[in-house]
Amino acid sequence: MNPDPFGPGEGRPGDDERSGASSQARIPSPRESVEDSGLPLPEPEAPPPPVLEHDVLKSLLGAWALAACAPEEAEAVELHLGTCGPCADEALRLRDAVGLLQPEESLDLDPGLRSRVLAGCLDKRPPRIPVPDWAVAYDAETARLDALLQDIGDGEWHAPVRLKWYDGESDRPVNRRTTVAGVIAHLLTVDGLVAVALGLEDPLGELAPEEPTPRARTETYWKASHFPPTRTVRMPWREQSHALVRTVSFAGGGSGQLSVPYGAFSLPLRDSLVDRAFECWVHAGDIADAVDYPYQPPAPRHLNRMIDLAARMLPSALAERRREGRAAPPKSLVRAGSPGRSLRLEVEGSGGGEWLIALDSPGAVGSADHEVAHVALDGVEFCRLAAGHVLPQEAAAGQDGDREAIRDVLSAAASLSRM
Amino acid sequence: MAKDAPPRWDRRMQQRLARGEAAALGELYDRFASLVHSLAHRVLDDEDAADRVTREVFAHVWENPEAYEPKQGSMRSWIASLAHSQAVQRLRKQGAAALAEGGEGSAEDLERKVREASAAARADYIVTSMPAPLRAALELAYFQRRDYRQTAADLGVTEDEARRRLRLGLQLLSSANDRKNGGSPWRQGYGRAT
């Protein structure tokens, strides 16, 4: 760069002063002030725009187009545009581009759209490797939760959430405090039980506790780090859920019989994934409450599978409570496979239906001819009960018939819940 | 935000779709549905119409996974271009039908509307695909009305760098207005913003 941009002899003030010191004539006498002359005052003159080089002016074009530079810089740019064709062309393009900046539309996708789009596709070209029908609810629920997570802000990952369930041993509600990220960590570690059963990597790795109960696994994961989980837990959870769906698809519908151990009990894979879908929905609801978002129940056919699984688990849950002395003894002995005393569970709303719950033995067959009681409740209310979010005595249920049988069945439903 | 997926993911996804794996279709939806839907919505400004375009685009990909050419760009850009052209086609068809039924306006008005909607959707895509630093600079200068010096301070970069990012960001965005591309960002490497 030229160290002296004005060059010599261009009338720099310093030159004048030095040369003019010897010659009075070069210094004109001061004019009469305009203020003293009675004439109108001229407009004050704006300071001249800074003289900037082409490269600097060009670099300012973006800021200029966005009206994000100082007024004198804007003026300098505009002067320059009158004399520089390439810059004028670019300035015009960039100005037009600014018109294209629009606030991001944050439209929530209709959660039901996913299954409609997928169904439409699979109709047009049937899949060679379908997702087994018992895994579809899990696929849909994990996608729904992930869409919710997509929308929540960084800070909301640390919003407090209370995990609630019903402790069957004390017949009391219990809860455990965590955060949104902590809930996803819980889902990650318990879904991990299914992953392990399928031969996939355990998200707990070496940390996996001896006893593979959902609670022990979750607590182990939470304790493994000094810091509470953050939003970074979303990726492993989502990758694992995708991997589960992918793996069971390849394993085929027959893999549904594979046993998934939960510590104290086991479930066949086909039920286990319905259970995981249910848990995913319940905890998505907990998260949505914590961050004040709306969250809808699952699609009716998925809700129906969840209710069906709970209804099928009721006779065993009842038998277990009976062994522990927390349910009335059987009224009659029933041979396995024979019809026995039953409670008719009527679940209303879309996704509902009717189930006959054998009361005296898990081996007995529910029978309309042996119905001793009838309970009617809404599908979502039943699920809240089975999730331990509402107490058996507080569930809004229409009741008719044997009071003891009704109380025992509702308590058994609540005892299905766990952390 | 959404970065271009590594090409390996794209090729693998293409193979899985070709193999007829329904789980792959679900993963594809999870990754791209909001992109497809928001592009369609920007063009059509109608929820139901955007839903329909979403259905058409995923059906097309599921039925023709071999139509994707990894050499030409990312799967993301391919799907964006499908969404864009389906939506523009639908807008033009709707407008032509309305004109034929004696609706207001002329054929030129319709063409202008289509052109503007098309550019707006392309611009959205370019903004979401551009490198995050450029996007952050535009966000501050335009939506938060910070001047470039404040933008530089907010981003912790020099003023020179802030000016560079604003100019480059707008240069990328201005390609959305290029009519000679005929609304096919796919062919002009729509997915590779830089």
Image: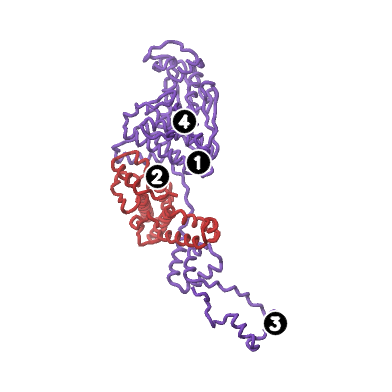
| Chain letter for mark 3 | A
Which mark identifies residue A217?
4
Q: Secondary structure at mark 1?
A: loop
| Chain letter for mark 4 | A
Q: Quadrant of residue A205?
A: top left
Say whether mark 3 and mark 2 are on the same chain.
Answer: no
Say whether mark 3 and mark 1 are on the same chain.
Answer: yes
Say whether mark 2 and mark 1 are on the same chain.
Answer: no
Q: Are marks 1 and 4 in contact (CB under 8 Å)?
A: no
Q: Quadrant of residue A299?
A: top left
The residue at 32%/30% (across/down) is A253
Q: Which residue is mark 3?
A: A37
Q: Which residue is mark 2?
A: B31
Q: Which residue is mark 1?
A: A230
Query: Is residue B170 in view from this perspective?
Result: yes
- Give the residue type that dot 3 points to: Ser
Residue most extreme to the top: A332
